[in-house]
Image (cartoon, rainbow, N blue to C red):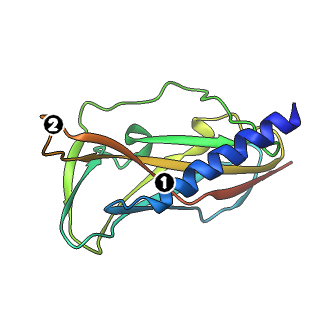
Amino acid sequence: MRSVALLALATATLQTACFAQQRFPVTVSISTSTPTVAIGDEIRINVAIVNSSDQPVQLLKSPDGDAEAISRVEVYDPQGNKLPWTSKRQRWLGIKTVAVDPGKSSDGFLNLNKLFDLSKPGTYTVIVHHELLQPDASQSEAKRLFVPSNALKITVTD
């Protein structure tokens, strides 16, 4: 069982590495001011989407900056098992697009412990995939892309 879990984490890491080689017009970076927390403490993850292209890009943004509404969030436990969501994913009706100039960022956040059960001590790995709509001249609709972030380690203690 442990080898299956490690294989799953290795596959997710490889997928993230493959996506990282793909050229996206934005870079997604996640961070926290508290990488070590006690069980039950709030775990706030800052999400920064930086326009790394040479022209303005349109990004999706929720009205209150909550990145959960426009991102796929993955959390892996210390054994490499992907954790299930503990709450329903919010999709806000007020999601809008904002223009972000080259080199500038659009910032958001998510409260990790409201989305996942992090009640056991250990080091968890977090990856956020930001949803990006990319115009496609060959189709009538924009293509949905999910741009992966860096992997962030969060340690939960007793």
The mark nearer the N terminus, 2 or 1, is 1
- Residue at x-position 39% and y-position 38%: 69
10 Å crowding of disc 1: few (<14), some (14-19), many (20+): some
- Residue at x-position 70% and y-position 55%: 154
Residue carrying label 1: 19
User: In the displayed structure, would residue 46 be above or below residue 87?
Assistant: below
Left or right of 90: which side holds 144? left
* Residue 157 in picture, x, y percent from top left: 83, 51
Between residue 98 and residue 25, name the one nearer to us: 25
- Residue at x-position 29% and y-position 71%: 104
In the displayed orientation, state which residue is furthest to the front.
Answer: 138
Left or right of 62: which side holds 111? right
* Residue 156 in picture, x, y percent from top left: 78, 50
Numbered disc 2: secondary structure: loop
Q: CA distance from mark 2 to mark 1?
A: 22 Å
Q: Is residue 111 visible?
A: yes
Please say if the residues under marks 2 and 1 sit with CB atoms less than 8 Å apart: no
In the displayed orientation, state which residue is furthest to the top.
Answer: 88
Residue carrying label 2: 139
- Residue at x-position 49% and y-position 60%: 20
Write down the quadrant of residue 133 in the picture.
Answer: top left
Residue 120 shows which numbered tag? none
Which of the image's four quarters has the N terminus?
A: top right
Q: Is residue 80 visible?
A: no
The kind of residue on which mark 2 rests is Gln
* Residue 115 in picture, x, y percent from top left: 58, 35
